[in-house]
Amino acid sequence: MKKILITGAAGQIGSELTEQLRNQYGNQNVIAAIHSNSNKKASITKPFCTLDIRDQYSLQDIVKQYEIDSIFHLASLLSAKAEQNPQLAWEVNVNGLMNVLEVARQNNCGIFFPSSIGAFGPGTPRDNTPQITIQRPNNIYGISKLSGELLCDYYYNRYAIDTRGLRYPGIISYQALPGGGTTDYAVHMFYAALQTKQYDCYLKPETRLDMMYMPDALNAAINLMQADSKKLQHRNAYNVTAMSFTPQELANEIKKHISNFEVNYQIDPTRQAIADSWPNHMDDSAARQEWGWQPSYILSSMVEDMLQQLEKKLNN
Ligand code: AKB
């Protein structure tokens, strides 16, 4: 990787990935693409450009102008937001990815594509979910992510485009907020614990899902993109996880630090149905074996660090 483009660079993962890649590859070599309507334009540092991922011609211009050879394609609607507008979700998540793949084919770029635990469905085994298994998602986000995995396979097999992907679990971070996801509760709970000491959770207390702390999510993407291509048997997309917990278990861990924190449950049927169709815990042994995936944070160390970092951020 010499010249990198990050789409969705103002998002939860994109903003921190931009920073980390700039530290490794140099500021001038990492171009942040943000949506023209983004309210974060003022805080994005150069070099950056505005891009609607549905516009293939603008993407082509940007890739040519900056002589891009690698694209981290993070622009996407998350699960709950996608369910509110399925047509837009298809345009952004599937047609947007097609644009990236086509431009990558014409300019010989490598691609990182984030799939998700959402690419599974209610028929998938929920415990120790295998790398290769039944995938029949029943919401538009899952359908778009599964389509993305298949499109990436297709461009690799048909055109030898170096596509690589991960099935991300819920991502927990303190810098940019997630927006429109089902796992967002896990981030919101920390803000509430520090600010109001009370949180109304929209998922049931026993809803178990895979999760990961942001430093591990960033390392996973970068390590996969730096891995030896010949070793990648399951390139699109690898199961990766770091921990698996329920809202109640997260609340209990936070209470070890903030004893008067209270959580109530007011279930949102849409997000609960989405979460109920996702795995409890994925088997990520293929990622461990093929490119050395190894997370650093478990639940207790993540909660401790999150509370410290978020408290500092809120005090500033
Ligand atoms: C979401 O909740 O939609 C995302 C995901 C797990 O893909 N965080």
Image (cartoon, helix red, strand yellow):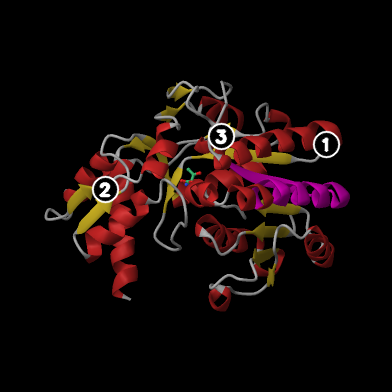
21 with respect to 277 (left or right): right
Cβ at disc 2 under 8 Å from ligand 1: no
- Above or below 260: residue 155: above
- In depth, the one of 272 and 1 nearer the eye is 272
User: Is residue 168 shown above or below 277?
Assistant: below
The residue identified by callout 1 is: 160
- Helix, strand or loop for disc 2: loop
Tell me if mark 1 has few (under 14), some (14-19) or many (20+) residues whose alpha carbon lies within 10 angstroms of its own. few
Q: Position of residue 50 (x, y in %)?
A: 68, 70
Instruction: Check disc 1 and give the amino acid type.
Output: Ala
Q: Report the span colored magenta.
A: 92-116
Rendered position, 132 above or below 179: above
Tell me what residue is drawn at x 58 percent, y 75 percent.
41
- Choose mark 1 or mark 2, whichever is in front: 2
| Residue sitting at x 68%, y 51% | 91
Is residue 242 among what the camera can see?
A: no
Q: Which mark's residue is nearer the viewer, 3 or 1? A: 3
Could one spot residue 279 in this view of the protein?
yes
Is mark 3 in CB contact (under 8 Å) with mark 2? no
The residue that label 3 is drawn on is 119
| Residue 204 position by quadrant | top left
Q: Are marks 1 and 2 in contact (CB under 8 Å)?
A: no
* Left or right relative to 124: residue 193: left
Q: CA distance from mark 3 to mark 2?
A: 26 Å
Please tell me whether mark 3 sits on a helix, a strand or a loop.
Answer: helix
Main SS type for the magenta part? Answer: helix
Amino acid type assigned to the residue bearing label 2 in the image = Gln
Give the residue at mark 2.
266
Going from N to C along the chain, the mark reached first, 3 or 1, is 3
